[in-house]
Amino acid sequence: MSLQQVAPELIGPAPFVRMVVRPLTKVLNPLVLKLAGRRHFRMAALVRHVGRRSGTPYRTPAGARLTGDVIIIPLTFGSRSDWAQNVRAAGTCSIKLDGRNYTATHPELRLVEDAQPLIRSAFSGFERASFGLLGIRQVLILAARADD
């Protein structure tokens, strides 16, 4: 696995996500959280992380994919989102993806254009097209180890 270091710029969500998608999350997140990480529910993995200031444990749904020994998460709400900052501050999190639990470490921000080989190997053409529609400019890449 070759994870290059890139100086991260914190990016917020695109206007469409801020105005349309974010308000929907208040309604949809409780349902998505119940399904996140389950087998055959590709829409969302379950990211378990700890608050960087509070130490409070959190659970956040995210569109993660596994490719080789790497988990890649498109940052729909940008790298300024609390959960992404929490994971980066801690340097680790656990992720339930397709019914399996993983320890994810060494979080790294990358611009979408710099992560194209990983993105192509993990996401379908339709999913990749949605990155542009949603204004996704960064991904979070983590080294993954199955907790079996």
Image (tube, grey):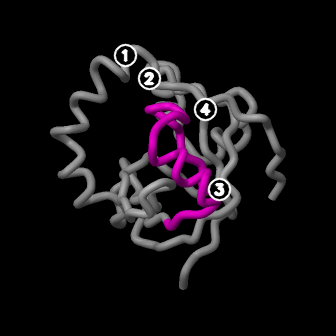
Q: Which residues are magenta?
A: 71-94
The answer to which quarter of the image holds residue 116 is top right
User: Badge 4 local density, few (<14 within 10 Å), some, or many (20+)?
Assistant: many
Q: Amino acid at mark 1?
A: Phe
| Residue 2 vertical placement versus 100 (above, below) | above
Q: Residue at x 58, y 75 (%)?
A: 146
Q: Earlier in the sequence, mark 1 or mark 4?
A: 1
Give the residue pinned by disc 3.
142
Q: Residue at x 63, y 72 (%)?
A: 145
Q: Position of residue 141 (x, y in %)?
A: 65, 49
| Magenta region includes residue 74 | yes
**Nearest the camera: 34 or 116?**
34
**Disc marking residue 138:** 4
Q: Position of residue 100 (x, y in %)?
A: 46, 73
Q: Is the N terminus in the top left, top right, bottom left or bottom right quadrant?
A: bottom right
Q: Amino acid at mark 3?
A: Leu
Residues under labels 2 and 4: Cα distance?
11 Å
Give the residue pinned by disc 2.
134
| Magenta region includes residue 23 | no
Residue at the extreme bottom of the image, as rendered: 148
| Residue 14 vertical placement versus 34 (above, below) | above
Q: Is residue 105 visible?
A: yes
Q: Amino acid at mark 4?
A: Gln
Q: Earlier in the sequence, mark 3 or mark 1?
A: 1
Q: Position of residue 74 (x, y in %)?
A: 53, 39
Give the residue pinned by disc 1.
16
Residues under labels 1 and 2: Cα distance?
7 Å
